[in-house]
Image: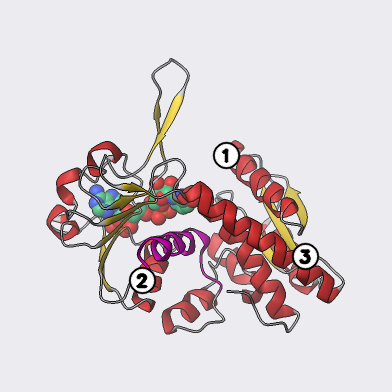
Amino acid sequence: MSARRIDGKAAAAALRARVAGLAQSFAAATGRPAGLATVLVGEDPASQVYIRSKRAATAEAGMRSDHHPLDAGTSETELLALIERLNADPAVDGILVQLPLPAHMDAARVIATIDPDKDVDGFHVVNAGRLAVGDPAALVPCTPLGCLHLLKAELGDLSGLHAVVIGRSNIVGKPMAMLLLGESCTVTIAHSRTRDLPAICREADILVAAVGRPEMVKADWIKPGATVIDVGINRLPGAEPGKSRLVGDVAFAEAAEVAGAITPVPGGVGPMTIAMLLRNTLVAAHRRAGLPAPE
Ligand code: NDP
């Protein structure tokens, strides 16, 4: 392996420690802790795990974590009424509705009901629009924000670099591309209809893979010395029966022979997502309290 391994776990731990310090100052200045409300509809086991770790991280950072578990049979109207209550609750700075929602609910309508200034996932169209026009009031989706943090720590100024983002989802690919454009990169967005993807990837100084296809990006897709950010989380059968292992969208071992720096899976982008959720909650809390928001 010649590439530097980008340690997302260490970067996330540092960020969480910084957020915890700022959360303490926020509570001292306002007389109340910053608060995140989480909502989970149904009992999807993966969603339960995500919510548990988000809540634990929130509490560990010295912020208030209120959880609202709802039955799988809850109606959309009841969920929207809960969101309205949380929008109006002064103790709640951030609202996170865990996705996916049950099939009888319209996720777009649910997200659109969240107050954009409490939308710490950054999925509301108002926040997508703010990001697109470069409005600093945007709350930005946590995963691409985490990727950008790692890239800036690795490379410093990104201006003029060619970034290729594979994936155009509203949660990862599109906001990632917008963030990189905001850093004055030349951005190419690739997707399932892109022609000759390997050739396009080989032009990238920064390659972000957010596809959901195990080890799709091979060594010969990578420009020597490029920085590779692997967002993918794919679960494959493990060596022992009944066990599984996680791999990214990049064939890590071979890619690390060519890249200049690369994130591993696990331990790369994943830990940054929760750290950025805490950061977004703290930023939302500062703005709501009329205090200057931390970086
Ligand atoms: P989506 O399924 O919403 O989007 C995948 C994107 O990849 C689409 O734009 C799709 O193109 C594109 N794509 C699919 N197949 C190909 C292909 N063969 N060649 C080129 N592009 C292709 O996924 P998400 O954006 O939500 O997530 C992407 C990955 O990131 C997943 O593995 C997910 O688990 C992971 N993830 C990780 C997070 C973390 O915290 N680390 C958080 C969120 C996601 P098209 O639009 O044309 O269909």
Q: Can residue 136 be seen in the rendering of this structure?
A: yes
Residues in magenta, as a range: 139-157
Residue 126 as seen in the image, left or right of residue 35:
left
- The three-letter code of the residue at mark 1 reads Ala
Query: Where is mark 3, residue-wise?
Result: 24
For residue 88, above or below residue 133: above
Q: Residue 89 lies in magenta, yes or no?
A: no
Q: Give the percent coordinates (x, y) of residue 243.
A: 47, 21
Query: Where is mark 1, residue-wise?
Result: 46
Mark 3 or 2, nearer chain start: 3
Front residue of 131 and 23: 23
* Alpha carbon separation for disc pair 2 and 1: 30 Å
Q: Main secondary structure of the magenta part?
A: helix
Graded by Cα atoms within 10 Å as few (under 14), some (14 to 19) or many (20 or more), the crowding at tag 2 reads many
- The three-letter code of the residue at mark 3 reads Gln
Disc 1 within 8 angstroms of ligand 1 (CB): no
Front tag of 3 and 2: 3
Mark 1 or 3, nearer chain start: 3
Q: Give the percent coordinates (x, y) of residue 49.
A: 62, 40
Query: Where is mark 2, residue-wise?
Result: 180
Q: Give the percent coordinates (x, y) of residue 199.
A: 12, 57
Residue 1 as seen in the image, left or right of residue 241:
left
Dividing the image into 4 quarters, which one contains the C terminus?
bottom right
For residue 38, above or below residue 122: above
Residues at circles 3 and 2 in contact by the CB criterion of under 8 Å: no
Front residue of 193 and 135: 135
| Circle 3 SS class | helix
The quarter of the displayed image where residue 71 is located: top right
The quarter of the displayed image where residue 162 is located: bottom left
